[in-house]
Structure formats: C-alpha cells, structure tokens
Amino acid sequence: MTCRSDNIKAGVERSPNVSLLYALGLTKEEISRPIIGVVSSFSEVVPGHMHLDKITQAVKEGIYAAGGTPLMFPAIAVCDGIAMGHVGMKYSLVSRDLVADSTEAMAIAHQFDGLVMIPNCDKNVPGLLMAAARLNIPTIFCAGGPMLAGHLKDGRRTCLSHMFEAVGAYHAGKIDAAGVDDYTENACPSCGSCSGMYTANSMNCLTEAIGMSLRGNGTIPAPYSARIRLAKHTGMKIMELVEKNIRPRDIMTAEAFDNAETVDMALGCSTNTMLHLPAIAHEAGITIDFAHANAISERTPNLCHLAPAGNTFMEDLDRAGGVYAVMNELAKKGLLNTSLITATGKTVAENIADAKNLDPEIIRPIDNPYSSTGGIAVLKGNLAPDGCVVKRSAVAPEMMRHDGPARVFDSEDDAIAAIYARKINPGDVVVIRYEGPKGGPGMREMLNPTSAICGMGLDTSVALITDGRFSGATRGASIGHVSPEAASGGNIGLVHEGDIISIDINNYSITLKVSDEELAERRKNWTPNEPKIKTGYLARYAKLVTSADKGAILE
C-alpha cells in the first residue's frame, strides 16, 4: 500500500533521508514497513508518567508484532499536584498547546503513517487529542492508567484530594502534624494518574468514550499487568487503523463529542473537561457551545460518585465494568449514538455489547441514579454573561442554592492567606479574579483554597467563584471559568466587598445583586489589572488565548 512515510523513504531522491534512517540502526526490512510514531510522555518528574517507559515498550512490541516499525518521540507533561499553589500552576493549562504544537511538528516533519499516543496526566491527554484531530492521520491512544487508592494507618482509603483537605483541617486545628504526615506518606501509593475522578482520569475515560482508545484505557490501574497487555493490543490495533485508513476525524465527529459529554455527565467528571472538549473539537473543525452541556445534563443521569464526590476510586470503577459498563447503562435509554465508528475498528454498539455492570453501588443502574441530571452545570447571569461551570455532583445539597456576601481577592495567594487566617465566615462567597487565561496568565487551578474551605468544614456554607479554574479533585460549591474574565473586562472585575451574590445551580443561574446602572457607574472608574507576568511564553500566551467558555484556545 502507499504510505505517508514514502515521502521520506521511496525513490532515489529520498536516498539521503533513508541514509539517516539507517543511522538510527533500522534495517532495510524495517524501513519498508509502515512507520508508526509512538508519542511517549514518559517522565521522571510526574508520578502519572514515571512508568510510561514500560507502556511505551509494550506498545512498540505490539506494533512490531503486527508488522509495523515504531519510532518513539517524547511529549511533555506537567504534574498539576506538584505545580499547585505557586507560580508553576500558571504553566499547567498552557502546556496543553505546547504538547499539541510540538506533536504536530514532529509528526509532519517525519511523515509517520500512524501514531500511538501515550499520555496520562491532566493537560497532556487533551493536548495529544488536539494534535490527533489537527493531524488527522490514523491514531490511537493508550494512557498510563490511574493510581491505586492509598490507605491511612487506620486502614481508611485515601487519595490526593483528601491530602489537600488535610492541610485545611490542620489550619482549622482539626488534625495535628502527625495526622498530616499520615496523609502525606500514604495518599499517593503508586505510579499513575491520581486515583479519583480528577481531570487526568476524566480525560482518559472520555478518550475511551469518544472512541479513540481500546476498552479499559480510562480505568485499568497503572500497576496492573492488564495495562501492559492493553498497550500491546493498542500497538497491534494501530496497524489495522493504518491499513483501513480510519482517521481521528472519522471517529471524533460532532455526535461522538455528544457521546463524550453524555458519559462525562454520567461519570461526574472534572470541570476541566469543559475547557478541553471544546478545544479538541475546535481542532476537528467542530464548535461546541459551552451552554450545550446543560441540555445534555438535563437528559443524562449521574451514575457515579467517585472521589472527590464520594469515597470510591478508579480501581473500583474498573472492577465494576469500567467506562463501557457506564455507556451500556446510558445506551439502555437511548442516550448515546451507538452507530459511530471507533478506534477499535468497530461501532460503539459492538464495543459495549458484552459490557456488564458488575457493581450497582459503584455504577448506579440507569433507573436508580444518584441524580436525574448530570454531574456538571453551566451557570449564566450578569456575573458571568458567557457562562461559568460547577461540578454539581460534588456540591452539598444545602449549597445548590446560596446567597451570600462577596469576599473579593485579586489573586489566589491573597485568598488562601485569608482562608488560612480564618477570616472567611459561613455564608460568604469567596471571589478570586484575575486568574483567568489572560489575567493569570495561564488560568491556575484553585485546589488549595477549595481544599482549605472543605478541610475547615466550610464546604456546606461557603461558595467560591473564580475566573480561574478548579482541579478535578475539588468539591463543594466551587464555580470556575467565569466568562468574560476580569482581565477582559468581565463583570467579575466590578464586584465589591460585601456585594450579594445569588447562586442557583439547579436553575443554572448566577447573579450579582447590583443594578445595571451601578455596574455602569463602577465601570467608568475602573480599568482591569495588567497580567502578572509580561515576559516569556506566558506573555505570548496571554496575547493569543481566548476565553474559558471557548475552551481557552489560541487564536
């Protein structure tokens, strides 16, 4: 068959190119086969990626077994947990575009016939999905898999979100230093993406739901040998996709994104999916309306309460049947388009035909959900005319409707200092602004302040609103992605200390109880704060990035 890689190896004119392939140690036989780029996100910095060298080797073995020649090249990844709470978090979201751009450069420069993406953590997964959609050559994903849950000394299971909340509990005098050490030493016991339904695991599950990976991609724990077998099968499968010329845009259609958002609602995924799905769709030439999530949420029941919403973990979801079992429940009510082609070479219907829900406590049956509506809600009102987002499934019932006075901070750092100093009172609405894509720049996650609020026992009485974003490990009435952001002239920049803010999650509304006339008067005497970083990559990013409701894509 004709290969893309013929552009670097076919004909006497390409003899100089071939001489460099020989320099790699490749044989004539290997050069004659389809050449597959293996995009490995292996790193000694990121716990979710520390084992990807083994996944990469297994993928390469699968490619060899199926008649291809694999060539590995790297992709970067930021560990959000390590980057959390300091300037490093400004580089988390922006790394998504670096991953996409660098992968595009490598894939086109070297004319691979197909790609196997090996991601795992928060921005690395969507970055590689963006690259796949942009390049549109046969591609399949094999993630590194989730971390196992930890165990405290008393036997209780724990995870990273509990770890962050323990810091808040310490500042509230609820646990001592030894208690913090117990979490520190035991919350993260293995390699893999952190063990709850946080952003990395959300995106790996949605990669499976949208059809870009094999079964188990989102849930098989990282340390399990089944993950190695999955990697080998993924390497074999790319050869079938190359032969049949099944490409990402054949798979990632508008209907497939609807499927992904539906599974998102059922699983109770991270609010960061509301940034990443539109950005991936954009690369595929598809526009996702931010508020469309509410229409999907209205018809999709929430079936899972994994951490931080509950006390179950990714290993439990895997044991219960994984993403395919959740999809099978949804398909019973006709909530998915099951005719779509996937990277398995089969349709969604064929993929999930034998999937069974093996634990109705982990995956609620479709007729007995946790709630009749989905896990995420997009709110609109004069505080967020273009929308903002909340993980509804992780909000205490008493906070679904809340009115309270604004406590205003122009940075995460100022807010966390006030929270730790116990200056936030029950009923308050903490407002953190100038942390959006432009204003940050980089749109930091706010896991430290939300965890502090929860750890201090205020999650049932205090809301937090920001033009920044939240970790998937966040729970409580934490409302992010306020659009327009303060740095772009959004009304969140006009909020004064003590203004009353009304939140009604079930009715998708958020209102600053200040008249239009008063807001207009305030605007006359107001200019947005300038970005806090004005040099390097972040300065270029701030000039190009769009608002959160559009996925914070670069234009």
Image: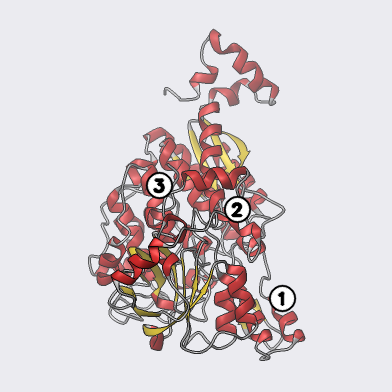
Give the amino acid type for the residue marked by disc 3 in the picture.
Ala
Which residue corresponds to mark 1? 184
How far apart in space, not on screen, are marks 1 and 2 (Cα)?
Answer: 24 Å
Q: Earlier in the sequence, mark 3 or mark 1?
A: 1
Task: Look at the numbered disc 2 and give the secondary structure of its residue.
Answer: helix
Tell me, for residue 297, which label it has, or none. Answer: none
Position of the N terminus by quadrant: top left
Task: Look at the numbered disc 1 and give the secondary structure of its residue.
Answer: helix
Tell me, for residue 91, which label it has, or none. Answer: 2
Q: Position of residue 349 (x, y in %)?
A: 29, 57
Task: Look at the numbered disc 3 and give the secondary structure of its residue.
Answer: loop
Q: Closer to us: mark 2 or mark 3? A: 2
Q: Nearer the viewer, residue 457 or 466?
A: 466
Q: Position of residue 19 (x, y in %)?
A: 65, 16
Q: Nearer the viewer, residue 453 or 374?
A: 453
Q: Please identify the quarter of the rendering in which residue 502 is found.
A: bottom left
Give the amino acid type for the residue marked by disc 2 in the picture.
Tyr
Q: Nearer the viewer, residue 352 or 178?
A: 178
Q: Residue furthest right?
A: 178
Q: Please identify the quarter of the rendering in which residue 291 is found.
A: bottom left
Q: Nearer the viewer, residue 184 or 34?
A: 184
Residue 243 visible? The answer is: yes
Give the amino acid type for the residue marked by disc 1 in the picture.
Thr
How far apart in space, not on screen, are marks 3 and 1 (Cα)?
Answer: 39 Å
Q: Please identify the quarter of the rendering in which residue 167 is found.
A: bottom right
Tell me, for residue 343, which label it has, or none. Answer: 3
